Each structure stands twice: as C-alpha cells, then as structure tokens.
Amino acid sequence: MEKQDGEKSAIEKAGEDLFNFAIDREDVKELMDQLPESAEVKTTAVEYELPILKIITVGWSAAYLMENSPHKNELIQVYWNAVRVFSQNLSETAGLMTESGIDYFEEIKKRFDQYLAAMNSRPGAGDPKAVIGPEFACACGNRDDVFAVLAGSKMFAGTINCVREYLKAFSII
C-alpha cells in the first residue's frame, strides 16, 4: 500500500476513518433517544459512557479483526494516536470550562481495562455482548438496569459490525 510524498497511505486513511467513526455521535443520539425515562440509571452517565464504549470498541474490534494482518500494528497506532490527540484537546477544553483537570484518555484506558477484566473473568460467556452490556450498565451506575445493559450491548455490537464492514470494504481483513 504505497503512497506518494505528502499522501496518506491506505492504512493511515483507514485509521483516520475509524477514528472519525468512533467520535461520530449519531448512534449515541439514537441510543439516547431509545432510553426510556423509566430507566434506573442517570441519563447523563449513559450519554458520557456511550462514546467511551464506542471508542474502545472501534480500537478493540479493529485489532481483533486484523489479528493476522501485516497492517494491524500500523492501523492501530494511527487510530490510538488520533484518540490520544482528541482526548488531549477534549481534556484541555473541559479543564478551561470547569477549572478542574480531567484526563479523558486516562478515562478511556480505565474503562478499557474494566471491560477487558470483565471479558477475562467470563471466558465461557460465548457472546461478548453478554459481558459488555452489564459492564456498561455498571459503568453507568446500575449494573441491573436493563435499558443501560441494552444500550451498551447495542453500541458494542453495532460498532463491531460497522468496523468489520469497513475493513472488508477496504480488503484490509
């Protein structure tokens, strides 16, 4: 996948495309619209956690789906570097508005570790949605809220499917 001077390689473009998909909020808005008022979880928590889950899922699924690809490391590096820059900018902006420090990338890493630990604790779960949904609800403040479980499961599954289709379209996997 060669490039000319000044042009991005296909892998760099794919990493940026995946990043742009990860921070797009349309599916977050749709899932928030589906969250009923009777949910026993704070809607602000769900709205905060959904984008984090999406960012994590894009990175995780790209690495998983490209497991045997010679381009995996380059794509993952481009993706996570873009997430890091985005997180720094978001953290700085939030810090200016709230006068308190926030490290959004650290929050993403913590949540990634939380989801990974949950997956590792249930290796026989079969479907990862069965683990991610409840763990997402836990991150939102109520592991037993069925609506939060469903929102997390939908975000996880939908994101993986989109990443898979994107990578297939570019013949990267």
Image: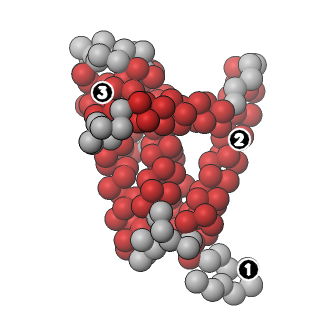
Q: Of the residues shown, which amino acid type is indicated by label 2?
A: Asn
Compared to 39, does 26 lie above or below? Answer: below
Q: Nearer the viewer, residue 33 or 60?
A: 60
Compared to 135, does 56 lie above or below? Answer: below
Task: Determine whether the residue tagged by mark 3 lies in a helix, strand or loop.
Answer: helix
Which of pointers 3 and 1 lies earlier in the amino acid sequence?
1
Residue drawn at point x = 51 percent, y = 51 percent:
59
Residue drawn at point x = 48 percent, y = 36 percent:
116
- The CA distance from mark 3 to mark 2 is 30 Å
What residue is disc 3 on? 149
Badges 2 and 1: C-beta atoms under 8 Å apart? no
Q: Nearer the viewer, residue 62 or 47?
A: 62
Image quadrant occupied by the C terminus: bottom left
Q: Of the residues shown, which amino acid type is indicated by label 1?
A: Gly
- Near mark 3 (Cα within 10 A), the count class, few <14, some 14-19 or many ≥20, is many
- Image x and y of residue 120, in percent: 44, 35
Image quadrant occupied by the N terminus: bottom right
Which of pointers 3 and 2 lies earlier in the amino acid sequence?
2
Between disc 3 and disc 1, the foreground one is 3
- Image x and y of residue 36, in percent: 24, 22
Relative to 54, is 29 on the left or the right? Answer: left
Question: What numbered label is drawn on residue 6?
Answer: 1
- The CA distance from mark 2 to mark 1 is 25 Å
- Image x and y of residue 5, in percent: 74, 84
- The CA distance from mark 3 to mark 1 is 45 Å
What residue is disc 2 on? 89
Q: Of the residues shown, which amino acid type is indicated by label 3?
A: Val
